Image (cartoon, rainbow, N blue to C red):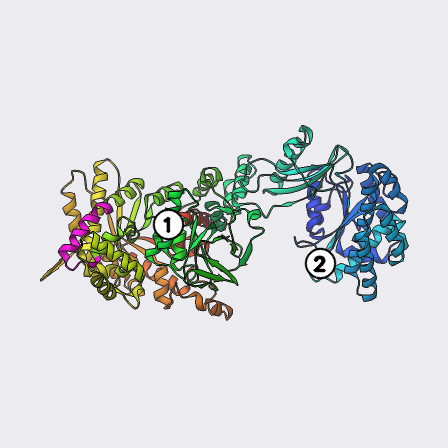
Amino acid sequence: MSMFISFGSGKHAEALKNSEILGSRGIRAASLAQLDMPICPGFIIPHEHLAHFINNPRGVVPELKEFISDIGKTMGKSFGGGKNPLLLKAVESPMLNVQSSLPSIHHIGLIDDNVEMVAEMSGEKFAFNEYAYLISSIIRLSIAASDDETEIEALEAYLGKLKKAKSKSTILKTIDEFREILPAEIYSDPLFQLQYVVQQFDEALKKSPTSEDSAVMIQAMVYGNFDKDSAAGYFYTHHIVTGENELQGEYFPAAYDESAPNGKSLDNLGKKHLKSLQDIAVKLENHFLELRWIRFAIEADVLWLVDQSSAPNKSAQAEIKTLLDLRDRDIVDNDYLIEKVKPGRLSEILHPTLDPKSVSKLKTQEGGIAGAVGAAIGRVFFNAENLITAYRQAQQAGEDTNMILAMPSTFAGDVKAIEVAQGVLSSEGGYASHAPVVARSLGKVALVRPDAVFRKKSVQIGGEEVKEGDYITMNVPYYEDPVLYIGQGSLTKPVLEHSGLLDFLDVIQTRIENIDVHANADQPRDAQLAQKFKARGIGLCRTEHMFFDESRIDRFRYMILAQDSVKRQEFLDDLAKDQTEDFYELLKIMDGHPVTIRLLDAPLHEFLPADEKGMKDFAAKAKADGTGLTATAIKERSQLLREFNPMLGHRGIRVAVSYPEIYRMQTRAIFEASYRLLEEGKNPRPEIMIPLVMNPNELKVVRNGKKIEGKHILGIRDIEEQVSRGFKKGPLDYRVGTMIELPAAALNASAIARYADFFSFGTNDLTQTTYGISRDDFNTFFSDYTELDLLPNNPFKVLQPQVKELVTTATLRGRMVRPDLKLGLCGEHGAEPQNIDFIAEAGLNYVSVSPYGIPIAKLAIAQMNLKARKQS
């Protein structure tokens, strides 16, 4: 058996049969040879043969000469020859696909006797600089291989002097001065030179625990600076950012490698070589089934491939469009596409991406918690009011409107600022805290930096101070640590229609069965985006977000602060017109698909001003509007509404019990919008969801109504009957259900199901109430818990066993009473691929996620279905 494995010389075609000993670099070269590509020929010395090579220097010479001769025949050159000798390079070929820590040795075969002849043909500067480079590389490798401090000191002195030598005379003078440092044959015997280099590689590899099993690869050198018909270059088989089916790269005429300045477009390369590269690109993609990177050289008008590899820096868009092209060539099928792409990568397509060059000179602060992936640039503002004011001023002046909201934490009143901002930076909470959740629903970027220290007009992040109005750039990728840059970078904005994502969703949809994806959508634009992403309905419309609109918030506040039900009803009648239009638009866009509308859930105090300035401004507005509300009355009423623990306080159905007129207005608006659409020939399918139910009696009252002495709560059924009388078309297909977000509700599901057509599991709040932890404060101790293995992962991202048990229990008990009970899961747990298997096993019908989470959830479901199909 040969101790060498050849590639590219046409003599040894079985290289890849020994792929386990070739190393990553060797496999890449052998793959090109197997595909009959013009790879620069060479051979690999597997690690298991290095000892024999070193210990039997004379015995290996015949075979070594034979392999070198084969290379020479392919290249038309002779090793150690005259003016145009065959020169070789030696590189480490590690078993793992990692960057080698050892120097590559180029120009092996250049010696005292032929360097002058090479100079005659290629120029003195080229020949002697390459000779110096060869000796310098051998010195560096010898330093890496040596344990002798005296030897290392001498080698370093030699290297330091040689680095400074630039001319023929200074190079030769330095070599003569230090000639005795290296074996004399280095300068006179090309074969010895090669053997010595391999020996040094062996010694150096033994010292590295990660490289001790590496192979050594020997390959012919080609020179892009050989003459005017030569060039060096590189290319990607698809554009690595846009994914367009075109070569992306450069070539450098008469240049040694691509580090030369003034690269030119491949379109200028000439038809012959450009066509060859295009054919090579297709062959490589068809073989590796992915986008590839190739390095090439043209020597004397002959094209050679030097190396090729995968392209880990490709965008998700480029990955998907390359796969779609492979599918269109009938190289892969739809199932391969679905299996190949990681769900989380789809987030990258949905958000702007950062141009790395634009931030290369900016100060960086790495780390933090990825709240919502993407990249965002903008001026920083430290409260919602300041940001919105600055935004309006910038709009009027035609200035930059890109802004970032930076606050320790956000609340419902800050949503209006997050909507116009590019992103949000916070310090409290984690992945499931308010700022990231809202950001994900709006397609914004969110970064949580627990180390950020907020002051009145600045924030301190990792030793860097950012003042209000300063620019920051946030890059929050899916699979890497977030990075915050101090200063202004630039972004590449996504265009969905050109991204390949919509075509990919068509592919994904072929494997969506049993469980589907709905959208969380509060605005018509959210519903339209959800439709683009092929959502089968709206699983959660949060009506409280609608009241934070600038044109409504004050009227809603007046309603909250009204002293009697008559005055409160006046404000509600006014708001009802807006609510009806809201629901009309959503139901019209989602015609024929269910739209689940959650009636008011947020505590009433969250709608009132949170600070002194906000309170003062609102009081002035109330006075100007003639409401009769004084600043003192507003303050007193606000203090009465504030709660110590609002998450478990006066919210959801509890507000409906105390103020039934609020839910009555919302319900009437839903039915009026729906009946209008019926009259127009549409097919509205409203589903009314009652939040925070803890026992069946609550839901019974809201659905069926209740009348006691002095109080009458009109039920949903009664309201529908009243509204329907004013329209000719009917009946309306509607449902009433509840969000299961309390353990009591989950355990009492059989009784609650008597009054519910559907359950939607609100797993964020269910996790909070099951574990007694706050999603906004959890991050303060989460790192301690993970360090001690007390919690395996973030419970607000990955469903935990006890929450799963409650979901399973509620499902079983609910369907025992109502077998046709529709079940869904609302929230960001549904967009996490790790949860999809459980959601399907539990028997849920759908998950509802933010519009930007739809593609991720769909891909995870499709991959789960494919896996199940293969196992069955």
Examine the rendering and report whether any part of residue 602 can be seen.
Answer: no
How would you rate the neighbour count of disc 1 (Cα within 10 Å): few for under 14, some for 14-19, many for 20 or more?
A: some
Expressed as whole percent of the image width and height from the top left, the position of residue 34 reads 70, 41
Nearest the viewer among 266 and 466 is 466
Specify start and end residues of the magenta stretch as a single range: 560-579
Task: Judge left or right: residue 217 versus residue 434.
Answer: right
Residue that protrudes farthest toward the left in the picture: 709
- In the rendered structure, the answer to whether residue 436 lies left or right of residue 168 reads left
- Is residue 253 at least partly visible in the picture? yes
- Give the numbered dot on residue 302: none
Residue type for callout 1 = Glu
**On the rendered structure, is 521 left or right of 872?**
left
Determine crowd level at label 2: few under 14, some 14-19, many 20+ residues with C-alpha closer than 10 A.
many
Magenta residue check for 483? no
In the picture as drawn, the residue positioned furthest to the front comes out as: 397
Residue 332: percent from the left, percent from the top?
55, 40
Residue 411 position within the rendered picture, expressed as x and y whole percent measured from the top left:
35, 59
Q: Amino acid at mark 2?
A: Ser
According to the picture, the residue beneath numbered tag 1 turns out to be 419
Secondary structure beneath dot 2 equals loop
In the picture of the structure, the residue carrying the numbered disc 2 is 211
How far across and down, in percent of the image, does residue 173 sit?
88, 51
In the displayed structure, would residue 757 be above or below residue 746?
A: above
